Amino acid sequence: MLFEAGGAAADPNARGEAALVDNPPAPGTPILAVGKAAIRMAEAAMAAQPNHGDVIIVTNPENARDVPGARIFAAAHPVPDAVGIAAADAVEDMLRAARDTVLALISGGGSSLLPAPAPGLTLDDKASVNARLLACGAEITEMNLVRQALSRLKGGGMLRVAAPAKMRALILSDVVGDDLRTIASGPTVAPLGTSADARAVLERHGIWTDMPPAVMRHLDLEEEHAPLPEADNELIGSNTQSVMAMAAAARDLSVPRHIHAPALTGDVVEAAQRVAGTTDPGIHLFGGETTVKLQGTGKGGRNQELALRTALHLEKDRRAWVYLQGGSDGRDGPTDAAGGFIDAARLAQMRGRVDVEALLANNDAYAALQAGDALLMTGGTGTNVADLGVLIRA
């Protein structure tokens, strides 16, 4: 119930309708929706202005479906593919043809879904960089700084392509702190940093020398850009808002509520210690987005690993507890699970069937949780505001 309340607070239809009810797009306005919530955000915009212009929707395959009057691109996430390249080409054509205003609907996942390699780079170059960033434990801000430096559309690139037309962007945040430069790599805002800053990220994580030669050459050349055209950017939903919605939903329960700040970020090992260290009885609510440094070959995602690691810390606690940790988009890493839903009984069931520590050491939280019937399976939710966690302690 609480996790569902958090997701409902980020419902793209409702948030989009609320933003457009008093200021709908003008007739003929082209609509561009990019991200995991793109379908439902686009439907809200199309309903607000039935006489809209062209509509392009770029989203992940799990959320993709036909929308009458729109061109749909089901692009890969988190590592970009050829469908994303085709989508980027179509988006650039739309932006160049615009004469007045473009309505851009931006949500999390857009970085990988809309790859537009900078001149001299290929899709394989971008995919290689993405894969290494995901594996090294880089935080989302670091990843998107690098992505911006390697892209034609990220870091304000859409504004340059569309000029002199203007852009109005409605943005659903999947990042802690809601920095618009980081959400979907900031296609309608200024970049997070320079090419030199991007190289520094890669060096800090020890993967600079693993970069394709074309990427190294590109980041060593700092380009001069004219000032970015202005855009009308509006935040319409966020992780913080979803955590507060979970708290509101818990108000009717006769137990204490604890909203934890700051959000869970950084390495999943430290985050698990923090969650398990909450000793007060009642409902503990968490938002955020952690990272995992891959050292094994197993299957899982940051939410599954956080759920399992937290459970191991709580295993010897004599009080009853239950912990749910999941991605608001319904997908955790390259799996069909949103995260984990675990208590002492499920953990005991796991131990009777598998070597939990061995699986965890291989980054195989999926197999461990599956053995205890502890996978959180929601299916694609059509939205994305990062991760939500609920720990209940007696």
Image (cartoon, rainbow, N blue to C red):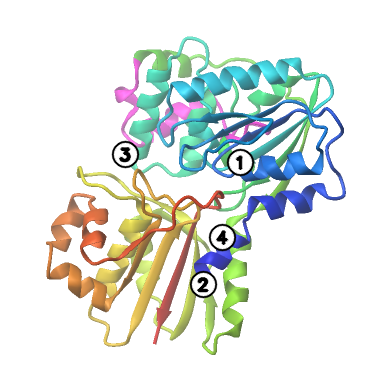
Foreground disc of the pair 4, 1: 1
Q: Which residue is mark 4?
A: 7
Nearest to N terminus: mark 1 or mark 2: 2
Residue 146's spot in the image, x, y percent? 48, 30
State yes or no: discs 4 and 1 in contact (Cβ < 8 Å). Answer: no
**Gap in angstroms between the C-alphas marked 1 and 2:** 24 Å
Q: Residue furthest toward the top?
A: 120
298, 198: nearer the viewer: 298
**What amino acid is at disc 1?**
Ile
Q: Secondary structure at mark 4?
A: helix
Residue 102's spot in the image, x, y percent? 76, 29
**Gap in angstroms between the C-alphas marked 2 and 3:** 33 Å
Nearest to N terminus: mark 4 or mark 1: 4
67, 360: nearer the viewer: 67
Q: Residues within 10 Å of mark 4 (few under 14, many from 20)?
A: many
Q: Which residue is mark 3?
A: 135
Identify the magenta region. 185-212
**Quadrant of residue 323 in the image?**
bottom left
**What amino acid is at disc 2?**
Met
* Residue 239 visible to an observer of this rendering: yes
